[in-house]
Image (cartoon, rainbow, N blue to C red):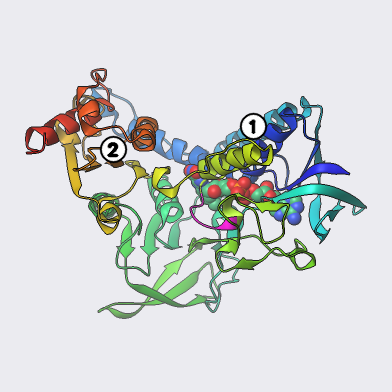
Amino acid sequence: MTDVLVIGGGPAGTPLAMALAQAGRKVTLVEAGPGLGGTCLFEGCIPSKIFRETARRLRELRAADTFGLCLPTQDAKVNWSAVLARKRAILKRRGETALARAGRIPTLEVVKGHARLLSPRSAEITLPNDQRRTISFEQAVIATGSIPVRPPIPGVDHARVLDSEDILDIGEIPQRLVIIGGGPIGVELGQVFRTLGSEVALLEAAPHILGPVDPELAQILTDRMQNDGIEITTGCQIKAIVNTGGDGVYVEYTASARGERRRFADTVLLVTGRRPRVEGLGLEQTGVTHGPHGIEVNAELETAEPGIFAVGDVIGQPMFAHWATAQGLALARHMRGLPSQFPLAEHNSAVIFSEPEIGMAGLTEAQARERGIAVGIARYDFAQDARAQIAAHDDGMLKIVYDKESRRVVGVHALVEGAGEIMGEAALLVRAGIPIEALANSIHPHPTLTESFGLAARMALASDPNH
Ligand SMILES: Cc1cc2nc3c(=O)[nH]c(=O)nc-3n(C[C@H](O)[C@H](O)[C@H](O)COP(=O)(O)OP(=O)(O)OC[C@H]3O[C@@H](n4cnc5c(N)ncnc54)[C@H](O)[C@@H]3O)c2cc1C
């Protein structure tokens, strides 16, 4: 018997289990994968950023002459097996650290295995040696994450068609890579492999890539990717993936106004989205319900079965590691009977690790207008920015969205290399609803990218009649 059974040791389940156990609850955390960390550590955020770091450094190296450095950069080569070895070492270290931290909490038991609910108060765990253990609990939390969507395209099961998990283990850099899906993962990995030498074509069904991103920023990035040699086709419908019988496949598609086309690839990366992982959990033995967006929960993340909660990717969008953790920690407080503030989507922040990065916090201009907010925009062009010029990363812009009536900042959107590092301040501005005047009056250090926040606010206020 345990107080709380947590199924899934990713960014949602692990901090939640630790917080509850640290507060004295007896917690059993069951994880089927290689360690604690979930998709984020083993198949997502961390390995993709490790690849990205290699590509970023190669790109910087190639630009050495910009900084007055004379290096034989044409000799720079990628040792892909060293990149993979570095990735494995970082993942192993992080996985072990998480397990060691969990091991120091006396009331937390971590079990490696696959959990399946048998009833609203009991579950069966299949251990790695196929032995089974039955456990009863007072409360349970389902934090089983999400899996890649595989659309029903003829030929999609061909061995050369990889999903985001497969490509993070790819044995060599593809020569001709076709990416189906222009979301964050497709864009990030497309740029990485382009920098590492692949010929990259990106096919997107929507009229533009990176749907939820501010369209101005998405357009700047699209231009940049095309300048870097990535062929982007939007408005595509994929018809089939056809085996050539040789060393690749043809991706057949139609693109508006261009008719039927085909594109040869030795590797196809299929990144058309992720869906909540609800299969094999025994939900039918309980009152837990689920729909197309995942497990259905109320505002306190409780499912239709009292005492069983769900958190993270398994309850649908937004699917981010930091969001899953924020939800998990809020739920832990709630389950302890403490007042808890569950995160709100309009306070979320995110980074697309493109080149340059896109950072987002709060509402876009369009979302703010949809909510009836009297929108004010503070803009800043990084072409005029000291730090961006010094770093030769000056092709970006910042947009701060504020409410002209309440004066509060409701959104921050930046495209610049380093945007990820300034999003912490942006998230705080939005979460605390800082007035645009307070931002204009705050003293940011010079020369830094974060200085752009104060400069944008001051320039906007100079032409704001309400100021
Ligand atoms: C390529 C890629 C890049 C990404 N990059 C970023 C990024 O840069 N930043 C960001 O914020 N997010 C990123 N994400 C998204 C992020 O990884 C997820 O949002 C996050 O991992 C969700 O956390 P979670 O705990 O809800 O689920 P998961 O991390 O998926 O964890 C669920 C865990 O449950 C386990 N599990 C499932 N079923 C069972 C069962 N029956 N019994 C026991 N265990 C089970 C799984 O093994 C898994 O470890 C990326 C995702 C991908 C695929």
**Does residue 367 appear left or right of residue 340 in this picture?**
left
| Vertical order, 359 against 445 (above or below) | below
| x and y, in percent, of residue 330 in the image | 58, 39
Q: Which residues are magenta?
A: 315-319
Give me the residue at 17% from left, 28% from top: 455
Q: Callout 1, which amino acid?
A: Arg
Q: Secondary structure at mark 1?
A: helix
Magenta stretch, overall SS? loop
| x and y, in percent, of residue 429 in the image | 33, 33
Q: Is residue 353 visible?
A: no
| Vertical order, 229 against 112 (above or below) | below
- Can you tell which mark lies on residue 121? none
Q: Callout 2, which amino acid?
A: Val
- Residue to which mark 2 is pinned: 416
Give me the residue at 80% from left, 54% from top: 115
| x and y, in percent, of residue 307 in the image | 73, 52
Look at the numbered discs 1 and 2 and tell me whether their residues touch, using CB distance below 8 Å.
Answer: no
